[in-house]
């Protein structure tokens, strides 16, 4: 499989660093492109006096690709500046040692990045975790990587309706295990039967135990055990669960025989387990066992640009032919303006109510919105998320001219992505001429940093 990257230089780098690295990458079978493109790129960072320009370059380029920074300056960066590069969007920062070692490090990261990207683009992921916002793609990237390349226990936290159960199912899909996904809702465990649900029981172990029965630990052997709402486990059961995780064996209720069970543990909760640990309602030793890797699917209000892709996904699911229906502009505006206290689950139910009122061919129109859910008057814009973003930028000292430029550039990039890079359709949506948008895009390309100066 041929892999390629693009490479750029910022500031004065060590003499011969770039040609030596190009040669080493070529020997490793990695082609180097001459200009930035979507994919994976390397930015060679030089003179310290250009640090601000380097941060700007990374911030711009990382919107298109994964950017790996290589520190080629005479003096190493201080730790604070290193974190600054990551905050700007770099995936990692490599110190320059030798071209051969640097090429090996780049190749290893490129291969992992390529494998993760292929999985993210697969139908198994695209049709399961829907959305293209940066915060959502970052989450999906992490979920794919931890699922496919580790056997780590995973703790999924977040509000109700954010997709915690979908993430658990995706972890099972990508884990490569042949075992089952065993799901146990901890809110349904009664004190009297909890032991049997987890450990199983022998015949006659208690009144009503007419037959032997496997519990969750037995059924999850060789697969994944998903404990939903793990924060609801009472303390005695937390202690018993901890022992099974540590020793990989358990005893059925009413038995003296230890049975082995090897499973990957995935837990989910909408509780703040760290606060529960602090107040003594959740065991600290269990928390650190189940939280080897943590993820938090964001609430829908933090990824509002995913609303319409989710709506289209739900409409395709609801349509018997799987084709969905276009939305009247007023319906699009309604769905974008509405609050979703139940997050994605709330959005899906809203779409379902609209869908079941719709009849006949053609787009879904405002009459399909249930009467008790309709808006009165035009939706307010700028809305609160936009105002919060502007306030955050101003607080960081962003000037008015830079703020306007960034907003325009972001709008162009978003619409081009939505329209499949079709300049004519994008210009129509943005209310400018095709020619004006072409000029704007050309100017933006020319403003990007290219090479050393």
Image (cartoon, rainbow, N blue to C red):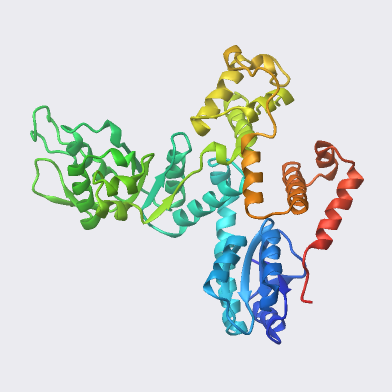
**Percent position of residue 300, x then y:** 54, 37
**Percent position of residue 372, x then y:** 57, 13
Q: Quadrant of residue 4?
A: bottom right
Q: Quadrant of residue 34?
A: bottom right
Which residue sits at x=72%, y=76%? 11
Residue 251 drawn above or below residue 385 = below
Residue 244 drawn above or below residue 418 = below
- Left or right of residue 168, residue 103 in this image: right
* 190 or 378, nearer to the observer: 378
- Left or right of residue 408, residue 94 in this image: left
Q: Is residue 89 visible?
A: no
Which residue ends up furthest to the bottom in the rendered image? 15
- Left or right of residue 252, residue 220 in this image: right
Which residue sits at x=44%, y=48%? 171
**Percent position of residue 100, x then y:** 60, 83
Residue 22 drawn above or below residue 39 = below
**Percent position of residue 2, x then y:** 66, 67
Viewport quadrant of the C terminus: bottom right
Task: Please count the marks in the image.
Answer: 0
* 91 or 110, nearer to the observer: 91
Which residue sits at x=65%, y=50%? 393
Q: Is residue 370 visible?
A: yes
Which residue ends up furthest to the right in the rendered image? 435
Viewport quadrant of the N terminus: bottom right
């Amino acid at each position: 499989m041929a892999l390629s990257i693009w490479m750029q230089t910022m500031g004065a780098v060590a003499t011969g660093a770039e040609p030596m690295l190009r040669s080493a990458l070529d020997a490793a079978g990695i082609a180097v492109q001459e200009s930035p493109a979507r994919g994976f790129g390397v930015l060679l960072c030089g003179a310290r006096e250009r640090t601000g320009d380097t941060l700007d370059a990374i911030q711009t380029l990382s919107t298109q690709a994964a950017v790996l920074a290589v520190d080629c300056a005479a003096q190493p960066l201080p730790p604070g500046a290193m974190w600054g590069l990551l905050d700007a969007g770099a995936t990692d920062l490599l110190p320059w040692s030798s071209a051969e070692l640097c090429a090996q490090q780049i190749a290893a990261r490129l291969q992992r990045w390529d494998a993760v990207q292929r999985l993210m683009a697969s139908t198994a992921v695209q049709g399961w975790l829907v959305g293209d916002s940066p915060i959502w793609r970052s989450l999906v990237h992490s979920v794919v990587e931890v699922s496919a390349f580790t056997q780590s226990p995973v703790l999924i936290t977040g509000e109700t309706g954010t997709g915690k159960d979908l993430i658990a199912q995706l972890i099972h899909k990508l884990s490569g295990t042949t075992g089952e996904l065993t799901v146990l809702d901890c809110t349904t465990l009664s004190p009297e039967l909890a032991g049997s649900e987890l450990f199983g029981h022998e015949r006659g172990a208690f009144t009503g135990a007419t037959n032997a029965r496997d519990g969750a630990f037995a059924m999850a052997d060789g697969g994944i055990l998903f404990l939903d709402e793990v924060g609801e486990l009472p303390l005695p059961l937390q202690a018993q669960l901890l022992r099974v995780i540590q020793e990989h064996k358990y005893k059925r209720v009413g038995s003296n025989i230890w049975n082995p069970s090897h499973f990957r543990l995935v837990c989910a909760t909408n509780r703040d387990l760290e606060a529960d640990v602090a107040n003594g309602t959740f065991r600290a030793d269990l928390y650190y066992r189940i939280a080897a890797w943590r993820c938090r699917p964001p609430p829908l209000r933090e990824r509002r640009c995913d609303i319409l892709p989710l709506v289209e996904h739900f409409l395709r699911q609801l349509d018997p032919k799987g084709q969905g229906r276009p939305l009247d502009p007023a319906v699009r505006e309604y769905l974008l303006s509405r609050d979703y206290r139940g997050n994605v689950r709330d959005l899906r139910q809203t779409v379902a109510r609209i869908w079941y009122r719709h009849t006949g061919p053609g787009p879904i129109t405002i009459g399909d919105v249930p009467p008790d859910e309709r808006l009165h008057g035009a939706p307010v814009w700028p809305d609160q998320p936009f105002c919060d973003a502007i306030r955050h930028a101003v607080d960081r000292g962003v000037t008015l001219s830079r703020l306007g430029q960034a907003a325009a550039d972001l709008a162009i990039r978003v619409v081009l992505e939505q329209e499949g890079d079709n300049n004519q359709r994008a210009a129509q949506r943005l209310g400018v001429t095709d020619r004006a948008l072409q000029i704007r895009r050309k100017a933006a390309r020319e403003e990007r940093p290219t090479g050393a100066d």
